[in-house]
Amino acid sequence: MVESNQSNRLITLEEYIIQGQNKFPGATGELSQLLRDIGLAAKIISREVNKAGITNILGEDGSTNYHGETVKKLDLFADRQLISALNRSDITCMVISEENDDIVRLDNKGGKYIVYLDPLDGSSNIGVNVSVGSIFSIYICDAKEGESLQVEHGLQPGVRQVAAGYALYGSSTILVYTTGMGVSEFTLDPSLGEFMLSNDSIGIPDHGTIYSVNEGNYRSWPEGLKKYVKYCQEERPEESRPYTARYIGSMVADVHRTLLEGGIFIYPDSNQYPNGKLRLMYECNPLSMVTEQAGGMAIDGHGRIMEITPKNIHQQTPIYIGSKVNVRKVQEYLEAHAEDPVKS
Ligand code: AFP
């Protein structure tokens, strides 16, 4: 909590980070610098996203990424901005990004942090002006001195994240992050060019009345999920049902709404995506850390997302994330129908 905020004094991201760092006399300030670097890249990406239509930066780059998805020019722009911001200070040794098949070793040999990035989540929505975002996840590199950096150094479970967050380029640009002590939100004031503290303790409601899932895939969902969604749609006014359906198609925006309003966001396994579609390391783990820090839950249908041992930097996972009551309820349905064959 930042006390001075109660007097309505505006606090910049910079000040907030320094205040947080001062609470830990032994802190080196490196993580603070890393967060500031990400904040700077987010401002530059925000500027380009906002004028994408007029600068001919909209559109496809002509290549595909690791997942076989068409790469947008803005995906690459965001990727380059974030990587060059992280290369500015000697703190990050390795970046792993959706847009790069392999790990990216930075020049900073002694850098202590590994950063995972989804540089522009939801980018297939850019052409229609829907919110997109940049997601980041930060780990300490456990390579020994002199040891060359390998993929394996990046394969750490989400519980080892030291910080995680996202920038969301929506009707306003916001930066949300956690270092494991709650969740803070900053809003970019374009006239000042500064991220200003807008919420120093985001808390997700324990229960919400919004469910968020791509129902186009209904026929190949696990049976437990089909039954849960029917439960959400039942007329039970005394329990605030039927719930409302909302699905943007940008996970970062759907999860942000879930944090503020409560409810659940789901991307399950299906015929098309037997292991789920969303990426464990740069989508699900960071958004799970933020959600848990705000008081919510995130599971893959069985266990906690952040306890999954990763085997591949681009691994996918099913995800059920949001308010505790909603996530526990869907888990009950999934467990009760785990053996049911999928009826499509
Ligand atoms: P893009 O970044 O390619 O637009 O993908 C977005 C995303 O990874 C995630 O942000 C969405 O929740 C999800 O895919 C949407 O997937 P569907 O279109 O299959 O619902």
Image (cartoon, helix red, strand yellow):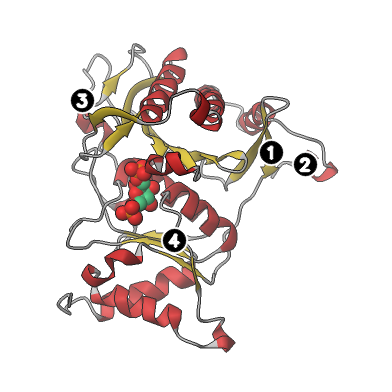
Q: Residues within 10 Å of mark 1 (few under 14, many from 20)?
A: many
User: Could you say where residue 53 lies in the image, as x and y percent from the top left?
Assistant: 50, 30
The amino acid on which the numbered mark 3 sits, given as a three-letter code, is Gln
The quarter holding residue 304 reads bottom left
- Image position of 322 with respect to 282: above or below: below
Whichever of callouts 3 and 2 sits on the residue coming sooner in the sequence is: 2
Q: Which mark is residue 66?
A: none
From the Cβ of disc 4, is ligand 1 less than 8 Å away? no
Q: Which residue is mark 2?
A: 5
Local SS, label 1: strand
Local SS, label 4: strand
Q: Which residue is mark 1?
A: 197
Local SS, label 3: loop
User: Do callouts 1 and 2 mark residues in contact (Cβ within 8 Å)?
Assistant: yes
Q: Quadrant of the N terminus?
A: top right
The amino acid on which the numbered mark 2 sits, given as a three-letter code, is Asn
Relative to residue 157, is residue 246 drawn left or right? right
Q: CA distance from mark 2 to mark 4?
A: 28 Å
- Image position of 221 with respect to 318: above or below: below
Whichever of callouts 4 and 1 sits on the residue coming sooner in the sequence is: 1
| x 44%, y 21%: residue | 81
